[in-house]
Image: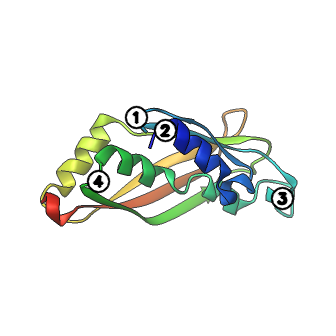
Amino acid sequence: MKASLFRHGINLWPPFLFAGIHVTEVSADYRYVRVELRMRPWNRNYVGTHFGGSLFAMTDPFWMLTVMQNLGSDYYVWDRAGEIEFLKPGRGTVTAEFRLDDAILDELRAATASGEKYLHWFSNDVVDEKGEVVARVRKQVYLRLKPKAR
């Protein structure tokens, strides 16, 4: 799927649309994604800052999707685990960026070349408009070469 079509489609996906999550950029090669979470009355918590579930949701699918798009259909790629560390209250618009480079892709291919499963942790930050880190997110992705490609 073309990255521009994917970006428009995911922005209309109800869990993102109604949470105020907006994908602002997806590179044509799916190696860069930028996501923002805008403050809305329905995604504020009791004390008026971003709801933690929305902060985590804005980062949820992107490591899996970028890896899947870059490794191709010969691989199983699944989210396996995730964790978030809240560092300061999030207010206003917050953003997260996902960058996938050749070194990571080479590591993933090498680790799965024998057909064994491989678990890889990715990490990124959610930052506010001042560039200060609001939350640090880690996602573990499961990878395995499909039997037909072994």
Q: Which of 147/37 is in front? A: 147
Q: Gap in Å between the C-alphas at discs 3 and 2?
A: 29 Å
Q: How is the image coloured?
A: rainbow
In the rendered structure, which disc, 3 or 1, sits on the residue that comes first in sequence? 1
At mark 3, the secondary structure is: helix
**Residue at point 29%, 53% (across, down):** 73
Q: Are discs 3 and 2 less than 8 Å apart at CB? A: no
**Residue at point 44%, 51% (across, down):** 65
Look at the image and tell me whether residue 31 can be seen. Answer: yes
| Residue 50 picture quarter | bottom right
Q: Amino acid at mark 3?
A: Trp
Look at the image and tell me whether residue 115 can be seen. Answer: no
Which label is found at residue 3?
Answer: 2
**What residue did someone put label 1 on?**
29
Q: Nearer the viewer, mark 1 or mark 2?
A: 2
**What residue did someone put label 3 on?**
42
Q: Are discs 4 and 3 less than 8 Å apart at CB? A: no
Q: Amino acid at mark 4?
A: Ser
Q: Gap in Å between the C-alphas at discs 3 and 1?
A: 33 Å
In the rendered structure, which disc, 4 or 3, sits on the residue that comes first in sequence? 3
Q: Position of residue 37 (x, y in %)?
A: 71, 46
**Residue at point 45%, 66% (across, down):** 81
Q: Position of residue 150 (x, y in %)?
A: 12, 60
